[in-house]
C-alpha cells in the first residue's frame, strides 16, 4: 500500500516548509513506523521524538491530520485521507520539524505544586491504597496521565490565553487534593481559583477529552474543582 | 464560595432563568394572536399588556437578567484573550458594569410616560 | 498546510465540543447586539403612539421578517446548547456531550425552529 506523507518541517532558524514523501507500507504501519521508514530510507534529517513505542511514555505526540495524537498509537490504515499531514504539536515551541520543547507545559504543571507535600516528610512507610478506599475510587481513571501534552496542545483556551494552567496540570492538582496524605490543599486551590489562569477559563470545549490517549475525562476533573470551589470546601468528591 | 465561583454559577442560573422568560416573550409578542402572528405589533397592543404592573416587573427583570448574562459572557470573552493584564481586566469589569446599568436604565425609561 | 476539508471534518467530528463552543460564543455576541437594537426600538414607546407605530413601520419590510426568523434560530441554538453546557458543567453528560449536541441543539432545535418559523413565515413574510 502506498501512502503520501506530508511533513511540516521547521529548520533550526525557524523557516517552515511542507515536504512530501511517498511511502510503501503494510497495513500494520503506525505513523511512528512511517516516520522511522522515512528517516532510514529517504531523508535522515527528519526530526521527531519518541521513546517507548507502545503508548506509555507520551513522547511521540504530533499533529496527525490536524488532530494531536500519539504517533505510535495511530495506524496509517485508520486514517481515511489518502494523504497524511504531520505537523508539530501546537502551543509548544518547535525545536526542529516534529520535535517540540515541553518547557511551556511544565511551567504550568509546576504552578499547581505537582509533588506530594506529605504530612510526615520523614516517613519511610509505603502508601497503601486499598482498592475501595475513597481516594482509589475518586481517582480511578485519572491517575493514568503520561504527560504527553496532547490535551495542552489542543485546548482552545490555551490558543489565546497562554497563562491558562491547562487540563493536565489541573488533573494532577486534583490527584493531589484528593490525596489524604497531602497538606498543600489550600495553596493549590488558591492557584486553581484564579480568574485568568485557573479552572474558570475552562469552557468545556472538551478537545482535551477527545484527544487524551489514556481516555481521562479531563473536563470532568476540571468540573469537580469548579463544583467544589462553588460549594466552598477544600475536599473534592465525585 | 469564591467570587469567581459565584460569577460562574450566576451565568448558569441566569441562563436557566432566561429560557422560560424567552419562551414566554416569544409567545406573547409573536404567536399569541393572529395580529401578532402577522407581525403587527402596535403601541396599543403593548400598552394593553404593559398596563399590568406584573408585566412591567417581568419585562424589567427580563432585561436586567439578559443584560447580566450577556455582559458577563462578553467579559468572559475578554478574559479568554490572555494578552490583557489584570489591570485591563479590572477596567473591562468596571466598564461592563457601567454599560450594563446605563443600558438597563435606557430600557426601563421606555415606560416612563405610561 | 492541512487542506480545509480535513480541518472542517475535525471540527464536526472529533472536536465537536469546540465547534459547539464557538457557536455559543458567536450566537451570544449576536444576541447581545440584538438586545441593543431591541432596547433602542422599545425605548421609542416613551415617544408616544405616533412615534412608536411609525418606527414599527420599518420592520414591516420582509427583510426584517426574515431576520426575525433568523433570530428565533439563533435563540434556540444558544438556549439548547446552553442547557447542554450546564449538563456538562454539573457532570451529567461529559461522556455523551457529542450525542447531546446532536439531539438537543440539532434534532430538538430543528423541530422547535420549524414549529416556530413556519407560522411566522406563512403569516408575516408571505401575506403582505
Image (cartoon, coloured by chain):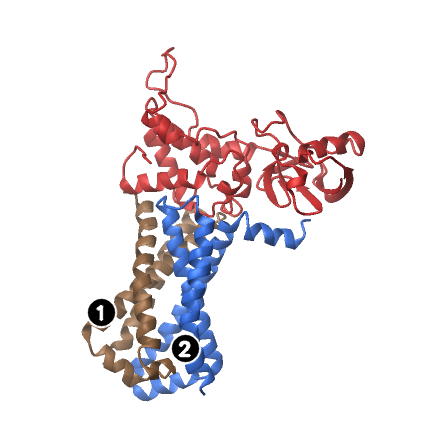
Chain colours: A red, B brown, C blue
Q: Which residue is mark 2?
A: C119
- Give the quadrant of residue A71: top right
The residue that appears at 33% across and 29% down in the rendered structure is: A185
Chain holding disc 2? C
Q: Is residue C99 visible?
A: yes
Mark 2 to mark 1 CA distance (whole Å): 29 Å
Residue C68 sits in which quadrant?
A: bottom left
**In this rendering, position of residue B14 left or right of residue C23:** left
Q: Residue at x 59, y 40 (%)?
A: A68
Residue A8 percent coordinates (x, y): 70, 42
| Vertical relation: C122 (above or below) B57 | below
As drawn, the residue found furthest toward the right would be A42
In percent of width and height, residue B20 lies at 30, 63
Q: Residues within 10 Å of mark 2 (few under 14, many from 20)?
A: some
The numbered dot on residue B23 is none
Q: Is residue B113 visible?
A: no
Residue A163 pos. (x, y %): 48, 41
Give the residue at mark 1.
B57
Q: Chain of mark 1?
A: B
On the rendered structure, is C69 left or right of B102? right
Amino acid at each position: 500500500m502506498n501512502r503520501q506523507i506530508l511533513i511540516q518541517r521547521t529548520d533550526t532558524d525557524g523557516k517552515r516548509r511542507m515536504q512530501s514523501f511517498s511511502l510503501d507500507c503494510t497495513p500494520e504501519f503506525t505513523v511512528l513506523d512511517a516516520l522511522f521508514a522515512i528517516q532510514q530510507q529517504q531523508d535522515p534529517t527528519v526530526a521527531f521524538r519518541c521513546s517507548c513505542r507502545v503508548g506509555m511514555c507520551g513522547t511521540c505526540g504530533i499533529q496527525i491530520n490536524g488532530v494531536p495524537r500519539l504517533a505510535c498509537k495511530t495506524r496509517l490504515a485508520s486514517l481515511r485521507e489518502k494523504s497524511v499531514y504531520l505537523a508539530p504539536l501546537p502551543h509548544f515551541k518547535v525545536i526542529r520539524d516534529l520535535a517540540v520543547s515541553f518547557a511551556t507545559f511544565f511551567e504550568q504543571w509546576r504552578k499547581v505544586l505537582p509533588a506530594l507535600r506529605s504530612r510526615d516528610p520523614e516517613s519511610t512507610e509505603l502508601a497503601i491504597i486499598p482498592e475501595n478506599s475513597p481516594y482509589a475510587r475518586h481517582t480511578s481513571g485519572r491517575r493514568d496521565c503520561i504527560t504527553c501534552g496532547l490535551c495542552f496542545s489542543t485546548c482552545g483556551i490555551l490558543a489565546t490565553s497562554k497563562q491558562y494552567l491547562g487540563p493536565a496540570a489541573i488533573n494532577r492538582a486534583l490527584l493531589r487534593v484528593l490525596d489524604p496524605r497531602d497538606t498543600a490543599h489550600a495553596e493549590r486551590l488558591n492557584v486553581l481559583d484564579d480568574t485568568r489562569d485557573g479552572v474558570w477559563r475552562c469552557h468545556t470545549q472538551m478537545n482535551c477529552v477527545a484527544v487524551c490517549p489514556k481516555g481521562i475525562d479531563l473536563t470532568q476533573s476540571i468540573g469537580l474543582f469548579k463544583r467544589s470551589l462553588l460549594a466552598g470546601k477544600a475536599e473534592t468528591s465525585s | 464560595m469564591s467570587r469567581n465561583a459565584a460569577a460562574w454559577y450566576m451565568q448558569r442560573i441566569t441562563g436557566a432563568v432566561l429560557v422560560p422568560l424567552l419562551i414566554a416573550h416569544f409567545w406573547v409578542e409573536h404567536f399569541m394572536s393572529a395580529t401578532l402572528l402577522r407581525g403587527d405589533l402596535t403601541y396599543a397592543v403593548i400598552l394593553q399588556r404593559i398596563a399590568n404592573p406584573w408585566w412591567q416587573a417581568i419585562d424589567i427583570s427580563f432585561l436586567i437578567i439578559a443584560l447580566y448574562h450577556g455582559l458577563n459572557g462578553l467579559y468572559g470573552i475578554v478574559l479568554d484573550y490572555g494578552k490583557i493584564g489584570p489591570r485591563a481586566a479590572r477596567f473591562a469589569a468596571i466598564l461592563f458594569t457601567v454599560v450594563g446599568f446605563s443600558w438597563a436604565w435606557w430600557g426601563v425609561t421606555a415606560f416612563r410616560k405610561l | 498546510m492541512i487542506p480545509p476539508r480535513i480541518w472542517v471534518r475535525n471540527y464536526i467530528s472529533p472536536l465537536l465540543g469546540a465547534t459547539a463552543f464557538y457557536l455559543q460564543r458567536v450566537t451570544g455576541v449576536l444576541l447581545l447586539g440584538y438586545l441593543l437594537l431591541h432596547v433602542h426600538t422599545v425605548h421609542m414607546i416613551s415617544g408616544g403612539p405616533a412615534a412608536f407605530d411609525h418606527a414599527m413601520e420599518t420592520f414591516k419590510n420582509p427583510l426584517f421578517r426574515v431576520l426575525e426568523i433568523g433570530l428565533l434560530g439563533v435563540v434556540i441554538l444558544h438556549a439548547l446548547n446552553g442547557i447542554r453546557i450546564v449538563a456538562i458543567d454539573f457532570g451529567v453528560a461529559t461522556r455523551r456531550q457529542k450525542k447531546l449536541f446532536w439531539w438537543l441543539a440539532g434534532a430538538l432545535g430543528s423541530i422547535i425552529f420549524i414549529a416556530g418559523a413556519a407560522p411566522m413565515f406563512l403569516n408575516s413574510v408571505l401575506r403582505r
